[in-house]
Amino acid sequence: MIRKLLYFLGLVFMLSSCYKAGILTSSVHPNEIKYIPYFEPVVYVNYIREKSIMEYDDSLSAISYYNVDSILTAKSSKYRLSEKIIANNEQEQEKLDTEIFSLVESLAKRNTLSNVVFPPTVKKVIKRSNKRFGLALVEVGYIRSDFNYIGKSFKEALLAPSYTGYYGNYVYKARTKVYVVIFDTLHDNLALYGESLGMDLIEPTNSRAVTKKINKIFRVYY
């Protein structure tokens, strides 16, 4: 049920935020933020086999999750991270994933920190750690199969000369977007909402490219 919910959220998420980008901050100064505990990364990767139908892919999502988790561990000092926040059980982790994903989806559409509804499970778990701040990272993206990509590209190439003024729709092999949020339990708000620029034409499993996207967000904020 949770996975099915994430599928539909992920689809809307990607389509609604392709052309937005930037950093939103509260009145909290970045120097106040040190040694932030962080949640398990929320990673959602689709695979396109037929037409442009996106399907959640367990294997691609698992690879991307491992990459992002490894990046956060390796760059913990640079990103001012402390320990990873571990949920008490699977049900609590599902609630955290859903709350974080839903919040970021909402912010990607609204592009403002005004009237943010602080996720209850997120707040409870951060306060349980006796911390003020908590960080979450979301990665979304998709990859087309080689057969699908070649077929769609060939079809667009054939259609373009057939219609006056028709320039075709560019077919992307893969796209990826990264979001970072820092929760502030003291003010029931976000200290930071950051998203990578556009939907870069990189595969979500490309660890080096994803690292660059995360670095840019933190470099702008810190």
Image (cartoon, grey):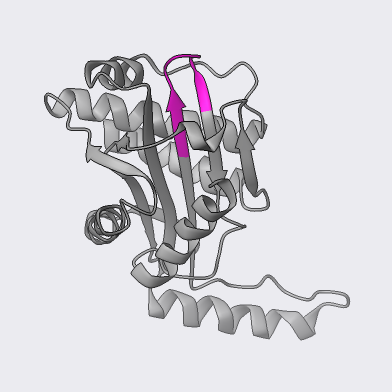
In the image, taking residue 19 as reference, residue 128 lies left or right, namely left
Q: Residue 198's spot in the image, x, y percent?
A: 62, 57
Q: Is residue 188 above or below residue 47?
A: above
Q: Is residue 164 above or below residue 44?
A: below
Q: Residue 79's spot in the image, x, y percent?
A: 39, 49
> Which quarter shows the N terminus?
top left
Q: Main secondary structure of the magenta part?
A: strand
Q: Residue 4's spot in the image, x, y percent?
A: 32, 37
From the viewer's side, name the closer residue of 85 and 93.
85
Most extreme residue toward the right, as rendered? 164
Q: Which residues are magenta?
A: 181-190
From the viewer's side, name the closer residue of 17 and 3.
17
Q: Is residue 171 visible?
A: yes
In the image, taking residue 116 as reference, residue 85 lies left or right, namely left
From the viewer's side, name the closer residue of 131 and 45.
131
Residue at image coords 37%, 21%: 132
Q: Residue 73's spot in the image, x, y percent?
A: 25, 53
Which image quadrant is residue 134 in?
A: top left
Q: Is residue 50 visible?
A: no
The number of discs equals: 0
Residue at image coords 66%, 31%: 110
Residue at image coords 41%, 18%: 119
Tell whether position 96 is magenta: no
In the image, taking residue 88 as reference, residue 172 lies left or right, namely right
Residue at image coords 31%, 22%: 131
